[in-house]
Every structure is written in structure tokens, then in C-alpha cells.
Amino acid sequence: MEKLTPRELILKSFKEKSSMKQDVYANTLASFNILKLTAKEVLAELKKDVNIIDKRIVLEYKEKGEFEFELRIAGDLLIFAMHTNIFEFDKTNQMWKSSYVKEDHFRSFCGMINIYNFLNDSFKYNRVQDLGYVIGRIFINKENHFFLEGKRQLGFLYNDFTHAVIDTNGIKAILESTILYCLNFDLFTPPFDAVKEISVMDMQTSSDSMQIKTGKRLGFRFQADSDEIV
């Protein structure tokens, strides 16, 4: 085989890898835009029934820019954020054992959408010390194949990277599973020893910027509620 010059290698990389990453980015952005529209529709449908159940329960959609939106689900806040870069998985990842990736290693390059869960009051009352959690990450490749890395049902329902192609129905299913997970992921009281001491400054701080941390699993190992990362 004839040895390529540095210039030819550069052009080859542009043709193969750079173009492929542009395809991955376009697929991820298209899916994220569908996710936005689907989130609005799902919340609108839920609102009709929730208003009959209890008018105090709040469901809200808020767009925060091209790459981020929020869903207020009762006392929770779900934040969906698309990363603008493309990622490859290291060789220890399970995907490299599949014939799908072995046949074309460029299939391992993915765009990423992160799903965060916070308490709504953390933002409402400017509790900047409060904690949130990444509960899921959606990965999409150049062929629109996808999988979701996450906790509980988010981790094992959507992990067929070889065959699963993302579409509107799949996005709706992911969204509903995410909402259900966050509703079942309750706020635990932290251990007494973790909160028995408090500074004078914290007590004197006004309630809208209280420095006492709050998080759903503050003081506990997150994995302890049997929802291990897959």
C-alpha cells in the first residue's frame, strides 16, 4: 500500500472523521428538537388530567436556549441539555464487543444529551449549595442508533445500541420514563450527624440564599437506592 503524505492524511481525516462528526451532530440536534416538541405535547396532555386530580400540581415547560430546556414536574426540575461536541467511547466500553461497532468503528462516535434532576425549590429560593443528579445520558450516532445510560428503568430499557434507532415514539418513551423516574426518586432526610452543626452565618443568611445543602440523597450513597448506573 502506498504511503500517504501528511497532507493526504489530513484530507483523509477531513473526509472520513470530520464529515462523520457533522452527521452525528446533525442527528443529535434533530433528536433534541424533537425532544423539545414532544416534551411540550406530553406536558399538555398530562396537565388535562392533573388539573382534575389537584390544581396545585405544577407542570411547566421552559426553553433555555437552543441546547437546553427545563421541565418542572411538581416539586422537581428536569433539565435536558445537549452537548455540542461529539464523543467516542474508550475501548473498555461494552459497545466494542458488538459486531455493529466492530464492523465500523466510526459508529462508536456519539452526540450526547444529558438529563439532570434538581429540586425546583433549589432554583426558586436560590439555594446554590443544593445538589442535583445526572439521571441519564442519551447517546446518538451517525446512523441515528442510540442508547441511554442511566439509572433504574432508564438504564435497562434503552440499551440496544445495535438495533435501536431513535424516532418520535422512542423519544416519547424516554421522556415518560424520565418523568416517572424523577417522581419515584424521593427526597430522603439526611442522617442527623450530617446536619447537627450549622454556622451562625448560615442561620443569619436570608432564606432566599440559605447555604444549608439539600439534595435527594444528601448524606447517602446515591447507588444505595438500588438504581445503579448501567
Image (cartoon, rainbow, N blue to C red):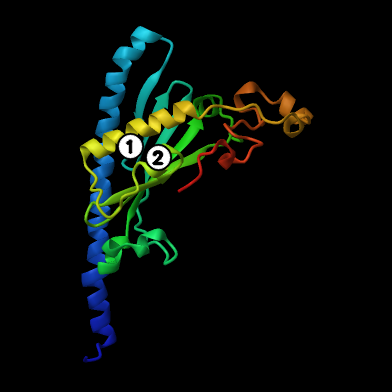
The quadrant the N terminus occupies is: bottom left
Query: Quadrant of residue 54 in the image?
Result: top left
Residue displayed at 74% across by 29% down: 192
Do the CB atoms of the residues marked 1 and 2 lie less than 8 Å apart?
yes
Q: Position of residue 184 (x, y in %)?
A: 47, 27
Query: Which residue matches tag 2?
Result: 154
Q: Is residue 130 above or below residue 103?
A: above
Q: Is residue 205 above or below residue 13?
A: above
Residue displayed at 28% across by 20% down: 44
Query: Which residue matches tag 1?
Result: 174
Residue displayed at 56% across by 36% down: 225
Query: Quadrant of residue 189 in the image?
Result: top right
Query: Quadrant of residue 35 in the image?
Result: top left
Q: Position of residue 177 (x, y in %)?
A: 36, 33
Numbered disc 1: secondary structure: helix
- Does the rendering let one see residue 31? yes
Q: Position of residue 70 (x, y in %)?
A: 39, 32
- Does the rendering let one see residue 114? no
